[in-house]
Image (cartoon, rainbow, N blue to C red):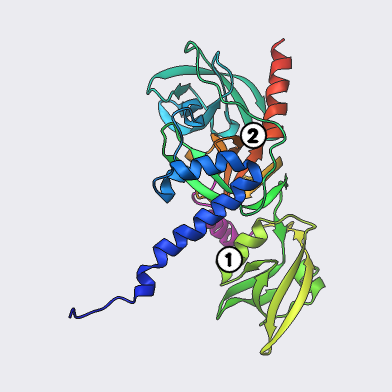
Amino acid sequence: MSRTSQNPLIGAIPAVLAIVACFSFLSTAMAQDADAAAKKLRRARSFEDLFQAGPEGVWQSVVEVEADGRQVGYGLITSADGQIVTKLSLLKNKLSCRLPNGKRFDAKLVFQDQENDLALLKVEAGRLKAASIPKNIKMQVGQWIISPSKSKSPLAVGVVGVLPKKILSASGFLGVTIEDGKGGAIVRQVAAASAAEACGLRVDDLITRIGKAAIGGRDELVEVVGALSPGDKVALQIVRNSRKVALTATLGKRDEPRTSQRRSRSRRFSRGFSTRRRGFKRAVQYDAVLQPSQCGGPVIDILGRVVGLNIARAERTRTLALTNDILLDFLMEAKKASN
């Protein structure tokens, strides 16, 4: 007998998780296209195969965007004559694109949309494989979506958490000073005339949940509130004097000057996030973790269809993708401008 014996239930966890994930894959796919989903499941030799691109996949239309020879993002080929859509704020100085075959070509900025941080580049590289951007693609919370690279392996896989909505330039503001508490974030100060004061939050309240999000401490609260917008109504669950209390707050907007300590804290929390990560007309939120230099490329569903464009790493576990209607409108405006 060995000195240690592993609980058989622990050994079964990976298999159970794979089964649950496969059922999630199947239920999402069936809602989109039952026949295509069934075929993909039959072809898959492992769970990872479900997220591998096929030989004719979108990955053939994904490029690496470079500035002064250094990769700054990804892009999507949208026309056979070399038009590529990407994230505008990534671009500077001498631009080039590296195709899936490894060849690099100089790129020229031909059109831009500052509101949605979109750019259209042009390369002279002969006839390229252009991606199709379908209309009327509907997404649902819990749906798997994939960020393809310019190879068959994905950059990231995530699950839709928030359906497409307008991403305002300003984030929501609750108006509390908080610290990590036992099982939540403990309130140390409530700002005057703030959303926190208006909803009845008090010093020493322990915030354990905001909406559907569990709050384990200060970082979670900052991330959840930062993902919301001024005017959003949120349900708060707190513990006060050992009793559970439910409150509803209408978030405000931060307007007071920041101290140097707050600015330093803000910079620390924003490391690894996209510089431009707010103010988009319509975007979906999902839980994949991309680096800022991995934004600008497409997002696809489990059937390989383009459903959006990665536009920002917004928070620690939150990436934003513009929806197809925004991309199609942008390409239409670019076409009109060129005529």
Q: Is residue 272 magenta?
A: yes
Q: Position of residue 329 (x, y in %)?
A: 73, 27
Judged left or right of residue 24, residue 55 is left
Look at label 2 and name its amino acid.
Answer: Asp
Res. 267 image quadrant: bottom right
Q: Secondary structure at mark 2?
A: loop
Q: Judge left or right: residue 3 versus residue 248.
A: left
Vertical side of 119 occupied by 41: above or below: below
**What residue do we see at 62% from left, 66% from top?**
221
Mark-to-mark CA distance, 2 and 1: 27 Å
- Residue beneath the point at 57% across and 69% down: 218
Q: Main secondary structure of the magenta part?
A: helix
Query: Eyeballing the image, is 317 above or below 108?
Result: below
Residue 315 can be seen, yes or no: no
**Image position of 58 with respect to 124: above or below:** below
Lateral position of residue 319 relative to residue 253, left or right: left
Region of the chain picked out in magenta, as a range:
258-273
Q: Judging from the image, what secondary structure is the residue with disc 1 in?
A: helix
Q: Position of residue 51 (x, y in %)?
A: 47, 43
Question: Circle 1 is placed at which residue position?
Answer: 220
